[in-house]
Image (cartoon, helix red, strand yellow):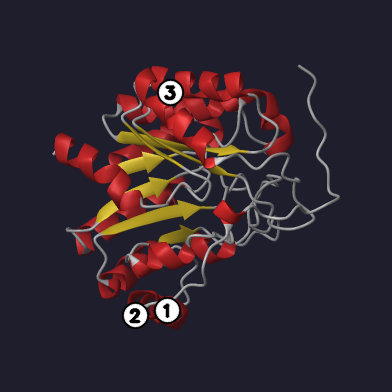
Amino acid sequence: MAKAKPSYTSIRKLPDWLKTSLPKGDNYSRLKTLVDKHGLNTVCESASCPNVGSCWSAGTLTLMILGESCTRSCQFCDVPTGSMKPPRVEEPVEIAKILSKLNLEYVVITSVDRDDLPDGGASIWAKTIHHIKERNPRVKVEALIPDFKGDDFHVNKICQAKPDVIAHNIETVESLQSIVRPQCRYSWTLKVLKNISKNNIISKSNLMLGLGEKKREVIETMHHLAEINCKILSIGQYLRPSRKHLEVVEYIHPETFAEYKTIGLSLGIKHIESGPLVRSSYRADQQAQNLLNNVH
């Protein structure tokens, strides 16, 4: 199959099912105030997530560690590339202290890729999870990690910190990987997720649609995830952050998302959240709750 070339021309009109209301509500306002006050770096804001209102109103948010700039230049992502700063060794303790003030029951921690660091930031990751668990024992922690180029040693270091869920996003089908995320590898993602499952931790991934993938490729990707015991999958519509990013090839209808959910569940994936506005951290607490109850 010939690989499609990215286009940077038109921005199409959004269908009605992709339109969202402005963030509002007391809980949203409370979290917004605390995030601003403590200078927290949330991927909800830096990646321009359309669900920031609903998630923050529900009392869940996604914090980003290891800086605001990434060493990679994925063509779908709104996080800046380059200008890397040394990691802040005090960050793990600071994050844990701040979380104790937010009164959350579930938190998602993610990070930029740090290919400039010898361990890719794995040690900061492990310390952050450890300090959060130590200071906030009731908080469930989901770690949305980079691929560490498939290095088992670095992934194992994070697994040993015992987050409740570890997510790593496959993002798109195999044929589009070199276009959508050119510095990543489909095989690295599968290796990372397989390692997480081997460590008896709930593994999770995310798939974006609308980039030109074929139906059979989406099903093949879900089959690969089921084979390595990926427990949770979120499937959503790719939305173009700006003219500098890949153009949307197709807006997928909600009925198709429902069909993919049915197929994925039949393949053996335990929980699937599938819909146009679904993102990796969307309803993360609800996605994980049944599986966590079965584990514990």
For the question of whether residue 101 can be seen, the reply is yes
Q: Residue at x 63, y 57 (%)?
A: 79
Up-down relation of residue 280 to residue 190 (above or below):
below
194 relative to 19 in the view: left or right: left
**Residue furthest out toward the right:** 9
Image quarter of residue 238: top right
Q: Provide the secondary structure element on which disc 3 rests.
A: helix
- In front: 68, or 125? 68
Q: Residue 135 at what x, y percent from top left?
A: 22, 64
For the question of whether residue 182 can be seen, the reply is no
Q: Provide the secondary structure element on which disc 1 rests.
A: helix
Q: Residue 182 at what x, y percent from top left?
A: 71, 36
Q: Amino acid at mark 1?
A: His
Query: How far apart, in angstroms, are the residues tagged by discs 1 and 3?
Result: 43 Å
Q: Which residue is the site of mark 2?
A: 26
Up-down relation of residue 59 to residue 79 (above or below):
below
Q: Residue 264 at what x, y percent from top left?
A: 42, 25
Q: Residues within 10 Å of mark 2 (few under 14, many from 20)?
A: few
| Mark closest to the chain's N terminus, 2 or 3 | 2
Up-down relation of residue 143 to residue 179 (above or below):
below
Q: Residues within 10 Å of mark 1 (few under 14, many from 20)?
A: few
Q: Amino acid at mark 2?
A: Asp
Q: Residue at x 44, y 61 (%)?
A: 63
| Mark closest to the chain's N terminus, 1 or 3 | 1
Q: Which residue is the site of mark 3?
A: 263
Image quarter of residue 83: bottom right
Can you tell which mark lies on residue 38?
1
195 relative to 130 in the view: left or right: right
202 relative to 24 in the view: left or right: left
Q: Amino acid at mark 3?
A: Ile
Q: Are marks 1 and 3 in contact (CB under 8 Å)?
A: no
